[in-house]
Image (spheres, rainbow, N blue to C red):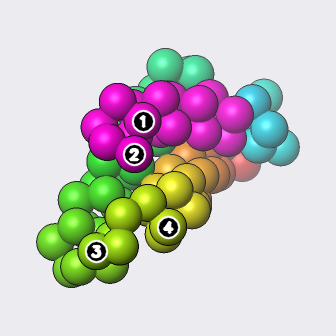
């Protein structure tokens, strides 16, 4: 996938995760922050997968692992910053 793919994936998943989260209206998280969190989580997942050898066969596991990490990070961030 490469780093340009990770950037696009993190940005799209970050914005989509913010947009679809049920607590986004009650929260203080802005879309740009969700995009940055998505980018950071996707990049961290790619680096961790490369360091551990999880992505040794190429792109088979890279897309779903980076997507799941990015979506989870955005969901937790929006949920934690919601007003209760």
Q: Are marks 1 and 4 in contact (CB under 8 Å)?
A: no
Q: Residue at x 16, y 72 (%)?
A: 51
Position of 7 with respect to 77 (left or right) is: left
Please report whichever mark, 3 or 2, sits nearer to the chain's N-terminal start.
Answer: 2
Q: Residues within 10 Å of mark 2 (few under 14, many from 20)?
A: few
- Disc number for residue 1: 2
Q: Are marks 2 and 1 in contact (CB under 8 Å)?
A: yes
Q: Are marks 4 and 3 in contact (CB under 8 Å)?
A: no
Position of 42 with respect to 68 (left or right) is: left
**Is residue 7 located in the magenta-colored stretch of the structure?**
yes
State which region is magenta.
Answer: 1-18
Q: Which residue is mark 4?
A: 60
Q: Which residue is mark 3?
A: 56
Q: Which residue is mark 1?
A: 5
**Is residue 4 located in the magenta-colored stretch of the structure?**
yes
Report how far apart the C-alphas of labels 4 and 3 lie in the structure: 9 Å
User: 84 or 70, which is in the foreground?
Assistant: 70
Report how far apart the C-alphas of labels 2 and 1 lie in the structure: 5 Å
Residue 84 in view in this figure? yes
Q: Which one is in front in this view, the residue at disc 1 or the one at disc 4?
A: 4
Q: Are marks 2 and 4 in contact (CB under 8 Å)?
A: no
Please report whichever mark, 2 or 4, sits nearer to the chain's N-terminal start.
Answer: 2
């Amino acid at each position: 996938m490469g780093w340009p793919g990770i950037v696009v994936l993190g940005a799209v998943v970050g914005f989509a995760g913010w947009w679809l989260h049920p607590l986004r209206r009650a929260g203080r998280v802005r879309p740009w922050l969700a995009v940055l969190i998505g980018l950071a989580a996707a990049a961290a997942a790619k680096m961790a997968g490369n360091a551990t050898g999880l992505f040794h066969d190429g792109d088979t596991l890279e897309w779903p692992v980076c997507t799941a990490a990015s979506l989870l990070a955005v969901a937790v961030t929006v949920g934690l910053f919601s007003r209760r």
